[in-house]
Image: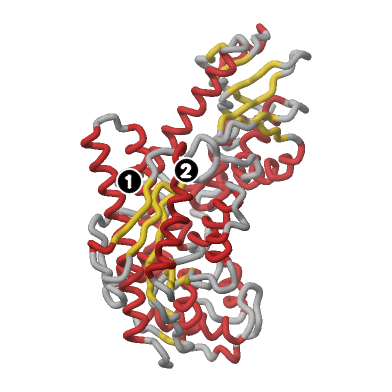
């Protein structure tokens, strides 16, 4: 007889944390940390929309078949024994292997077998966490039937034996992790770690150790290669001659190694290093930034705000195109194109400055969505002589900054760099999405107008920030080395 107490309890709800970080999933289960609760409004919105989608799937199923809600593991077994058509909030347990799981639905087919099914906001079933969760339920049921995923865009997908490998990997690694009494060693990843609830717990230890992956551009796998060469701290890397560092996986070529050494020096000293002259286009600059909502019912991002800062560059120089709902999406797109034509006439040497590739990619997506790839304005925006100018490119090409991330706010908020602050310090792209979803749901006209005003203010701050970044680059790095 297997000793059940010796088998770690493994649950598929750990799949997302496991897919992100081994330490995170260990802390979820064994950390016992006394951390101050963090209110993440975006995560709360995701959960709310997830519950709404799950309820919508329930209502759809209940309109066609008999759906019973399970109240316990014993009740789930009873409903399965009775052969009901569908079970909502099923509770499964496999005491022999120490598994437990809670699929949203179990749906009985014509042969009397049950298929696990989950409602997901995701537009794809290929995400590792989803593959593991549904693969885990299939394993618990001993089912050869594919699992069902009700996706966020209303489509339905199936997950079958192709998920077995990653599911088995999850189970094996979870057993090893949960059998360990010490936190697993992991590498730092700026975007991933900053969004983690254990950030304040882990970050000081990374800093005390001078973990190499704290440096922008030095991935964990590159850090492993540097350690094999005897370079295990940021101080050691800062003191190294890049010429003497051999090519290692994920850190190859003289320029990349030079930048890694300079990044280490910048991290330690706070200095900015310029590697090449900065070149910016001449002309009349209009700063450009969009806000979009990925949490739509049809699975297509909706740009609710196309924002611009025109010459004059004051608060009063902010212009925009706004759409209240997804139903106005095409109208907003056409108004954006009309605004671009207006700027072409107003500014004969137009430079449409933005930060990162998001704006260009979105324009390409919209042109495809509405069959307008050959539209004259679209060809102008995306063609060889495009006015679009990504301000992140000269930063990444020419500068090494004392930062762990090279996002717009990372650079602009730093007191020793651009040093401009947003009116609402908590605002950001996810904040904007939360506010817009509140705007959609709000019925009070005054509150609705306040929410819209707050979003417009945030976008105005963004384009003012790219203007200040432009000025900072021109004042300090143009034509210099």
Q: Can residue 211 be seen in the rendering of this structure? A: no
Horizontal arrangement in the rendering, residue 93 relative to residue 323 (left or right)? right
Kindly identify the residue that appears in the image at 21 percent across and 36 percent down: 446
Q: What kind of element bears circle 1?
A: loop
Number of numbered labels in the structure image: 2
Kindly identify the residue that appears in the image at 41 percent across and 32 percent down: 48
Give the percent coordinates (x, y) of residue 428.
35, 54
Is label 1 or label 2 in front?
Answer: 2
Residue furthest top in the image: 82
Give the percent coordinates (x, y) of residue 73.
56, 18
Q: Which residue is mark 2?
A: 329
Graded by Cα atoms within 10 Å as few (under 14), some (14 to 19) or many (20 or more), the crowding at tag 2 reads some
Horizontal arrangement in the rendering, residue 82 relative to residue 339 (left or right)? right
The span from disc 1 to disc 2 (Cα, nearest Å) is 34 Å
Residue furthest left in the image: 446
Q: Quadrant of residue 222?
A: bottom right
- Name the image colouring: secondary structure
Position of 480 relative to 347 (above/below): below
Q: Which residue is mark 1?
A: 38
């Amino acid at each position: 007889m297997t000793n059940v107490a010796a088998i770690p309890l493994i649950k598929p709800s750990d799949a997302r944390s496991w897919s992100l970080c081994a330490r995170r999933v260990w802390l979820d289960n064994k950390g016992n940390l006394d951390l101050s609760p963090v209110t993440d409004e975006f995560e709360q919105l995701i959960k709310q929309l997830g519950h709404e989608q799950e309820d919508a799937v329930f209502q759809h199923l209940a309109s066609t078949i008999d759906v019973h809600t399970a109240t316990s593991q014993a009740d789930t077994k009873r409903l399965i024994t009775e052969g009901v058509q569908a079970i909502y909030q099923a509770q499964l347990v496999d005491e022999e292997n120490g598994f437990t799981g809670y699929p949203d639905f179990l749906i009985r087919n014509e042969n009397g077998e049950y298929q696990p099914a989950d409602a997901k906001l995701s537009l794809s079933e290929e995400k590792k966490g989803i593959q593991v969760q549904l693969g885990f339920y299939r394993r618990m049921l001993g089912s050869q039937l594919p699992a069902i995923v009700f996706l966020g865009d209303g489509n339905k997908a199936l997950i079958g034996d192709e998920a077995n490998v990653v599911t088995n990997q999850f189970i094996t690694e979870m057993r090893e992790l949960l059998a360990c009494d010490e936190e697993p060693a992991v590498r730092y990843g700026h975007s991933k770690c900053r969004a983690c609830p254990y950030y304040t717990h882990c970050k000081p230890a990374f800093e005390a150790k001078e973990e190499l992956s704290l440096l922008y551009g030095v991935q964990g796998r590159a850090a492993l290669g540097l350690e094999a060469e005897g370079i295990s701290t940021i101080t050691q890397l800062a003191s190294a001659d890049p010429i003497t560092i051999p090519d290692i996986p994920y850190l190859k070529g003289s320029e990349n190694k030079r930048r890694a050494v300079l990044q280490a020096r910048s991290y330690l000293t706070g200095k900015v290093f310029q590697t090449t002259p900065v070149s910016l286009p001449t002309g009349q600059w209009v700063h450009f930034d969009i806000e979009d909502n990925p949490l739509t019912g049809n699975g297509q991002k909706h740009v609710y705000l196309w924002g611009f800062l025109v010459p004059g560059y004051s608060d009063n120089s902010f212009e925009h195109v706004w759409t209240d709902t997804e139903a106005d999406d095409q109208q907003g797109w056409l108004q954006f194109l009309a605004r671009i034509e207006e700027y072409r006439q107003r500014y004969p040497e137009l430079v449409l400055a933005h930060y990162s590739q998001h704006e260009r990619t979105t324009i390409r997506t919209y042109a495809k969505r509405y069959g307008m790839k050959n539209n004259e304005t679209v060809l102008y925006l995306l063609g060889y002589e495009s006015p679009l100018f990504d301000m992140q490119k000269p930063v990444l090409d020419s500068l090494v900054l004392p930062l762990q991330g090279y996002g717009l706010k990372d650079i602009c908020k730093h007191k020793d760099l651009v040093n401009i602050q947003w009116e609402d310090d908590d605002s950001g792209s996810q904040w904007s999405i939360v506010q817009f979803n509140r705007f959609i749901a709000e019925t009070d006209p005054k509150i609705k107008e306040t929410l819209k005003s707050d979003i417009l203010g945030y976008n105005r701050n963004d384009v003012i920030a790219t203007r200040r970044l432009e000025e900072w680059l021109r004042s300090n790095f143009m034509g210099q080395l």
